[in-house]
Amino acid sequence: ILNVEQSPQSLHVQEGDSTNFTCSFPSSNFYALHWYRWETAKSPEALFVMTLNGDEKKKGRISATLNTKEGYSYLYIKGSQPEDSATYLCARNLYNNNDMRFGAGTRLTVKP
Amino acid sequence: NAGVTQTPKFRILKIGQSMTLQCTQDMNHNYMYWYRQDPGMGLKLIYYSVGAGITDKGEVPNGYNVSRSTTEDFPLRLELAAPSQTSVYFCAGRENTGELFFGEGSRLTVL
């Protein structure tokens, strides 16, 4: 994998459902993996920065895991709410620890 | 309020015109970035800077230039605007935690 890839591209769930999506990235020269939440007409906001293989972070109902050896990270949302509707972006430092590249995002829509 | 400030928020340009998108921050960020938002493509890195006087190309630098004469300011210049440069541009500074802190964005339309 040469670039940061996210799947699925979009996701529609019902309120109360739990959901997860994937970020895949080059495993070589890994420095850090970031997750951002991006609401329509706003700026992206940081959720997590993860650096260690096996790292697991949690913020309220949202959590993330990291596997640097195989080059993937999962973002989990437990009990989705309509206010969770947003695009979720992941990014990693590619080539060096300064060049931050983003995936195309997963657009989540939570229906009441 | 402390943060990353972008100006202008909206601008319409004619093909061939030039302009500068301003970005200034008061959060003591050494690292600063310019991204453009392409539909369905997320954010594409244009240029970044690791400190005053140092800039580097990102994924899509063609048609753009940057400078970093001070730590606070990181302007992005379009010399000959083209329709392909119609986009929303985001400037960001990097916190000590590694997180990027974004400005509110500048929407540019080239007609």
Image (tube, coloured by chain):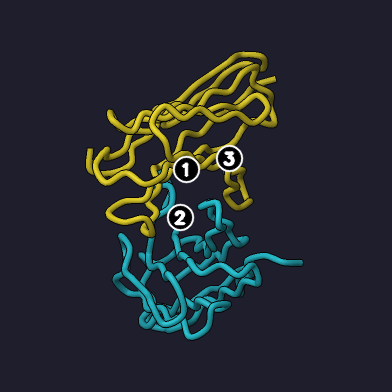
Q: Is residue B17 above or below residue B89?
A: below
Q: Which mark is residue A34?
A: 1
- Mark 3 — on which chain does it sit? A
Q: Which mark is residue A5?
A: none
The chain coloured cyan carries which letter? B
Q: Secondary structure at mark 1?
A: strand
> Label 3 sits on what residue type?
Leu
| Front label number (2 vs 3) | 3
Frontmost residue, A3 versus B15: A3
For the residues labelled 1 and 2, the Cα–Cα distance comes to 18 Å
> Label 2 sits on what residue type?
Gln
- Mark 1 — on which chain does it sit? A
For the residues labelled 2 and 3, the Cα–Cα distance comes to 19 Å
Which residue is under mark 3?
A47
Q: Residues within 10 Å of mark 1 (few under 14, many from 20)?
A: many
Which residue shows up at 50% across the image and 63% down it?
B89
Q: Pick out the residue farthest to the right.
A: B1
The C terminus of chain A lies in quadrant: top right
Chain A, hue in figure: yellow
- Whether marks 1 and 2 lie on the same chain: no
Q: Is residue B62 above or below residue A22?
A: below
Q: Residues within 10 Å of mark 2 (few under 14, many from 20)?
A: some
Q: B78 left or right of B104?
A: left
Q: Is residue B3 visible?
A: yes
Which residue is under mark 2?
B37
Label 1 with label 3: CB-CB less than 8 Å: no
